[in-house]
Image: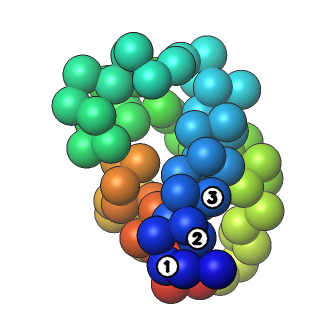
Amino acid sequence: MGRRRVAKNQRERIMAALADVLYVDETDFADGDDTDLRDLGLDSVRFVLLMKRLGVDRESELPRRLADHLTVAGWVRELERR
């Protein structure tokens, strides 16, 4: 499986989680994958729900890295580094 396919799978997982937790779809992303997730309603409670939905270990450094990059594009990069 190529790197592009892995990124596409990560993006699909992230988008599904965002749709589930924030009740958004792709048309809500004014800047595409660079849209700031806070503009779509992300707050600390929803961030924790998203971490659970994405299977992120809250004790790892990954939540901090994701919090530093609050876009779909940023999350794809960080989850690929996992």
Coloring applied to the structure? rainbow
The picture quadrant where one finds residue 67 is bottom left
Residue 23 in sight in this render: yes
Task: Residue at 57% x, 38% y: name it.
Answer: 15
Task: Residue at 64% x, 80% y: name it.
Answer: 1
> Mark 2 = which residue?
6
Quadrant into which the C terminus falls = bottom right
Look at the numbered disc 3 and give the secondary structure of its residue: helix
Neighbour tally class for label 2: few under 14, some 14-19, many 20 plus, Cα within 10 Å: few
User: Vertically, is 74 above or below 81?
Assistant: above
User: Vertically, is 28 above or below 74?
Assistant: above
Q: Label 2 near label 1: C-beta < 8 Å? A: yes
Neighbour tally class for label 3: few under 14, some 14-19, many 20 plus, Cα within 10 Å: few
> Mark 1 = which residue?
3
Residue 50 at what x, y percent from top left?
A: 67, 45
Q: Label 2 near label 3: C-beta < 8 Å? A: yes
User: Vertically, is 79 above or below 24?
Assistant: below
Residue 41 at what x, y percent from top left?
A: 45, 22
Q: Disc 3 marks which amino acid?
A: Asn
- Between the C-alphas of marks 3 and 2, the distance is 5 Å
Neighbour tally class for label 1: few under 14, some 14-19, many 20 plus, Cα within 10 Å: few
> Mark 3 = which residue?
9
- Between the C-alphas of marks 1 and 2, the distance is 5 Å
- Between the C-alphas of marks 1 and 3, the distance is 10 Å
The picture quadrant where one finds residue 30 is top left
User: Vertically, is 26 above or below 2?
Assistant: above
Task: Residue at 78% x, 53% y: name it.
Answer: 52
Look at the numbered disc 1 and give the secondary structure of its residue: helix
Look at the numbered disc 2 and give the secondary structure of its residue: helix
